[in-house]
Image: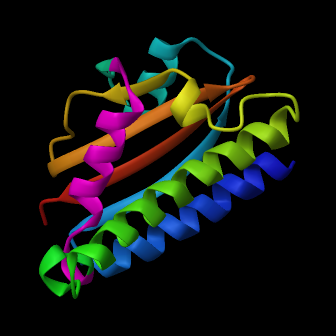
Amino acid sequence: MNAEKYVFELHGYLKALQRLCGTNYAFGARFYSKKEDLDTFGQKISEKKLKYEEADHVSIFKNIESMVFNGFLAKEHVPNERAWNYLTKVIIEDINEYFGLVSLALNEDGIFHPLLNGIIYKNIAPFEKDKASLIFWIEIEQHYVLAYFRNINR
């Protein structure tokens, strides 16, 4: 299935960003078949009852920026404001594009930008080892696509 391939590519993209941020970061993406409701799914991925809420793409994108722009990607390493704006725009567009490719692979008549037009679910309770975390997922057809951005205490 091509959808899984695109999630795997998104995972690799996020891992590359993770490496630029430093050793305390863990970024990635996962693909799940929707075999259960949201509460059961949340318990499956966190081994306890997951606390989540619906979120809009603007807050998700701001959270992604706050997690990604560290280490080599920190603002002080970017030569000017124009380069900074370009970098933030491109990374968000890339992530959004991967979600769109997954959506089209599952249904060619579906929503191309599910992060902009779909319902996003965001974890609201950090994990014990996290300094900060952003974990969100979206339902596309009969699947969940989850992305995570974690700053881990080591």
Q: Give the range drawn in magenta.
A: 53-72
Residue 28 x, y percent position in the rendering: 47, 57
The answer to whether any part of residue 49 appears in the image is no
Residue 7 x, y percent position in the rendering: 65, 53
* Residue 56 counted in the magenta span: yes
- Residue located at (20% from left, 29% from top): 125
- Residue located at (51% from left, 40% from top): 146
Residue 112 x, y percent position in the rendering: 71, 37
The answer to whether any part of residue 81 appears in the image is yes
Q: In the figure, 79 relative to 48: above or below?
A: below
- Residue located at (36% from left, 29% from top): 122
Closest to the observer, 65 or 142: 65
Q: In the figure, 81 relative to 32: above or below?
A: below
Name the side, left or right, on which 80 lies relative to 105.
Answer: left
- Residue located at (80% from left, 40% from top): 104
Residue 68 x, y percent position in the rendering: 29, 63
Residue positioned most to the front: 82
Closest to the observer, 67 or 22: 67
Name the side, left or right, on which 58 lies relative to 99.
Answer: left
